[in-house]
Image: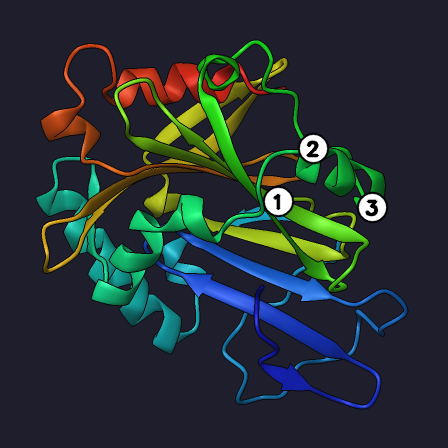
């Protein structure tokens, strides 16, 4: 669950800055004064709750621009692919994702019953043919209503595949994308959604391939517990991830 960063009497903003994927995700609680000016020391750009938009790298405040510059160098060095680091703790969480998720029996139905927005339909995607091994619902309430969910699948070859979706509009959140960090796109209905493809690796050698994109209502993250460029072969490479993402409705 995304942790609180700063709290004021009338405004609680929770944000996750992930330069690796080029997004700033802000959540403003319902009823808060969304037009209230942020603290002058707060480097997070202002966005409107329930909206998504793009900015250019040059328009970011200096602290954020320096951090994004580091990711731009990674992007260029990776020939259009972002390569990043994964901590040993993250690698352990990845390897044990199926064990930490709620058992699938009834868990997805329970999430649907208490969700702010129904989860995406994966029936037309490869996920429908994989084994659903667990479900992880998230916030803002411990027992719902839930605005995000991660579904954990296992491919026939044993590789874990995870789909996380966050209904940011329903939670009063907003998305700010940095144009220069978008290196892919995902077709969603008739729209072409900006996306980023990245590969992260831990000191142990464990890798995760991530494709993240956002629509006008949700942010999606598709994660595969392997380097799909090096180990995915012709059937499970980057093109497969893009096809899988575009089959999610």
Q: Percent position (x, y) of residue 129?
A: 47, 12
**CB under 8 Å between discs 1 and 2:** yes
- In this rendering, the answer to whether 121 lies above or below 46 is above
Identify the residue shown where x is 38% and y is 70%. 64
- Between marks 1 and 2, how big is the CA–CA gap? 8 Å
Label 2 Cα crowd, 10 Å radius (few <14 / some 14-19 / many 20+): many
Q: Quick check: can you spot residue 44? A: yes
Reading the image, the residue beneath label 3 is 114
- In this rendering, the answer to whether 228 lies above or below 11 is above
Q: Which quarter of the picture shows residue 227?
A: top left
- In this rendering, the answer to whether 49 lies above or below 45 is above
Mark 2 or mark 1, which is nearer the start of the sequence?
A: 2
The tag on residue 149 is 1
Reading the image, the residue beneath label 2 is 119
Which is more toward the observer, 175 or 204? Answer: 204
- Between marks 3 and 2, how big is the CA–CA gap? 11 Å
Q: Percent position (x, y) of residue 7?
A: 69, 86
Identify the residue shown where x is 46% and y is 23%. 131
């Amino acid at each position: 669950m995304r942790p609180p960063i700063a709290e004021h009497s009338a405004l609680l903003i929770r944000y996750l800055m992930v330069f690796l994927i080029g997004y700033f995700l802000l959540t403003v609680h319902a009823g808060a004064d969304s037009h209230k000016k942020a603290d002058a020391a707060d480097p997070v750009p202002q966005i409107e709750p329930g909206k998504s938009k793009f900015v250019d790298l040059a328009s970011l405040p200096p602290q954020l621009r320096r951090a994004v510059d580091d990711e731009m160098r990674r992007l260029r060095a990776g020939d259009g692919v972002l390569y990043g680091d994964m901590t040993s703790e993250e690698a352990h969480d990845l390897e044990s994702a199926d064990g930490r998720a709620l058992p699938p029996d009834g868990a997805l139905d329970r999430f649907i019953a208490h969700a702010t927005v129904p989860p995406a339909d994966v029936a037309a995607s490869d996920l429908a043919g994989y084994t659903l091994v667990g479900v992880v619902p998230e916030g803002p309430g411990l027992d719902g209503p839930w605005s995000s969910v991660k579904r954990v699948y296992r491919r026939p070859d044993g590789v874990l595949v995870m789909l996380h979706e966050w209904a940011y509009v329903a939670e009063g959140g907003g998305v700010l994308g940095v144009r220069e960090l978008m290196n892919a796109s995902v077709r969603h209905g008739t729209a072409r959604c900006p996306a980023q493809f990245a590969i992260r690796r831990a000191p142990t050698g464990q890798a995760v391939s991530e494709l993240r994109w956002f629509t006008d209502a949700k942010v999606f993250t598709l994660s595969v517990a392997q380097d799909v460029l090096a180990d995915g072969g012709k059937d499970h490479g980057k093109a497969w991830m893009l096809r899988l993402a575009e089959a999610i409705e």
